[in-house]
Image (cartoon, rainbow, N blue to C red):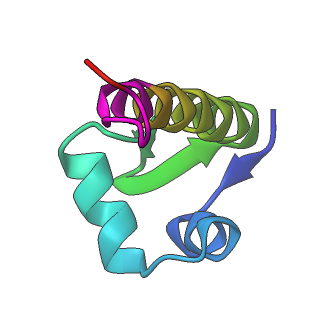
Amino acid sequence: MKLLTVKEVSEILRVKTSTIYQWAETEEIPCFKLNGCLRFSEDEILAWIKDCKKKSYLAYNTLADRRPRKGRLE
């Protein structure tokens, strides 16, 4: 298991380190503390990214189905 730092995760996700700290505090991203420092399992982060992608795709499709379609009589 490869452990990542906050800076490494922020570079992977292309977000600020403060965002990573906020997500960790609200338990939105998988992490743990090691000697008082946040650490992330690379495997868990990659799985989390895939899971977020699936949620976004499903949410988009749900919203798309709710939009009225042009040219349809109801």
Quadrant where the C terminus is found in the figure: top left
**Residue shown at 60% from the left, 63% from the top:** 9
- Image location of residue 63, percent across then percent down: 35, 34
**Residue shown at 59% from the left, 76% from the top:** 14
Q: Nearer the viewer, residue 68 or 60?
A: 68
Above or below: residue 9 compared with residue 55: below
Q: Nearer the viewer, residue 46 or 24?
A: 46
Membership of 49 in magenta stretch: no
**Residue shown at 41% from the left, 50% from the top:** 35
Quadrant where the N terminus is found in the figure: top right
- Image location of residue 42, percent across then percent down: 73, 42
Give the image quarter of residue 41: top right
Horizontally, residue 67 falls left or right of residue 5, namely: left
- Image location of residue 29, percent across then percent down: 41, 41
Q: Nearer the viewer, residue 11 or 5?
A: 11
- Image location of residue 55, percent across then percent down: 48, 28
Q: What span is colored magenta in the figure?
A: 62-72
Membership of 69 in magenta stretch: yes
Instruction: Looking at this view, name the residue that lies furthest to the right.
Output: 1
Above or below: residue 12 compared with residue 26: below
Give the image quarter of residue 27: top left
Above or below: residue 36 compared with residue 61: below
| Figure disc tally | 0
**Residue shown at 55% from the left, 72% from the top:** 10
Q: Nearer the viewer, residue 39 or 15?
A: 15
